[in-house]
Amino acid sequence: MTLSIRNQLPGTVTEVHPGEVMATVKVRLDGGPHLTAAITLEAVEQLALAPGTAVRALVKSTEVSLATQRVEGLSIRNQLPGSIARLVTGEAMASVKISLAAGELTAVITKDAVGDLGLFVGSDVVALIKATEVSLATA
């Protein structure tokens, strides 16, 4: 299957915490950092997720926010440090390719945000991703 989702990060499930309807799944991305996904319990069962399961974490580029440093006091579980490898700015929006320890991640943000944050190729950023915006696929 081919998907339009650019961000497909390989990793391995390390923990599954089931609830009544949803579960949180911790994934150690290839390259080191952890990512948390909040998915339905039904999806956990259908994918047979358990520690050791190889997965791909899928995140739409429009669901990745950027900060210039780690943010405290925030409910967003996933904060991945990296640096900007490519920056393409259009009239209203910008595509930002971030080099992470786990590979590359693309964020689509407004042109105004690029200016307000002072972003440029080589600048350090932290990619912010809500756990509910992370989907998982088995390898």
Image (tube, rainbow, N blue to C red):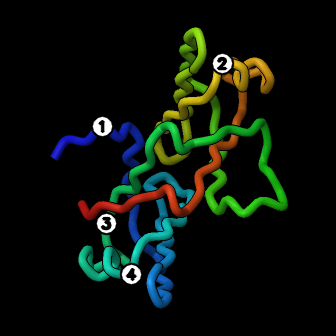
Residue topped by disc 4 = 41
Name the spot of residue 18 as percent of width and height, x first.
Answer: 47, 86
Q: Which of these two is toward me, 45 or 98?
A: 45
The residue under the point 47% across, 73% down is 25
Q: Is residue 125 left or right of residue 25?
A: right
Which residue is located at x 53 percent, y 44 percent? 63
Q: Secondary structure at mark 1?
A: loop
Verify CB contact (< 8 Å) between mark 3 and mark 1: no
**Residue at the spot of label 3:** 54
Identify the mark nearer the N-term, 3 or 1.
1
- Amino acid type at mark 4: Leu
The relative height of residue 48 versus residue 102 in the rendered view (above or below) is below
Q: Earlier in the sequence, mark 1 or mark 4?
A: 1
Badge 4 or badge 3: first in the primary sequence: 4
Gap between marks 4 and 3, in whole Å? 18 Å
Q: Residues within 10 Å of mark 4 (few under 14, many from 20)?
A: some
**Marks 4 and 3: CB-CB under 8 Å?**
no
* Label 3 crowd bin: few (<14), some (14–19), many (20+), radius 10 Å: many
**Left or right: where does residue 82 sit relative to residue 135?**
right
- Neighbour tally class for label 1: few under 14, some 14-19, many 20 plus, Cα within 10 Å: few
In space, the residues marked 1 and 4 are separated at their CA atoms by 25 Å
Between 116 and 87, the one lying in front of the other is 116
Q: Which residue is mark 1?
A: 4
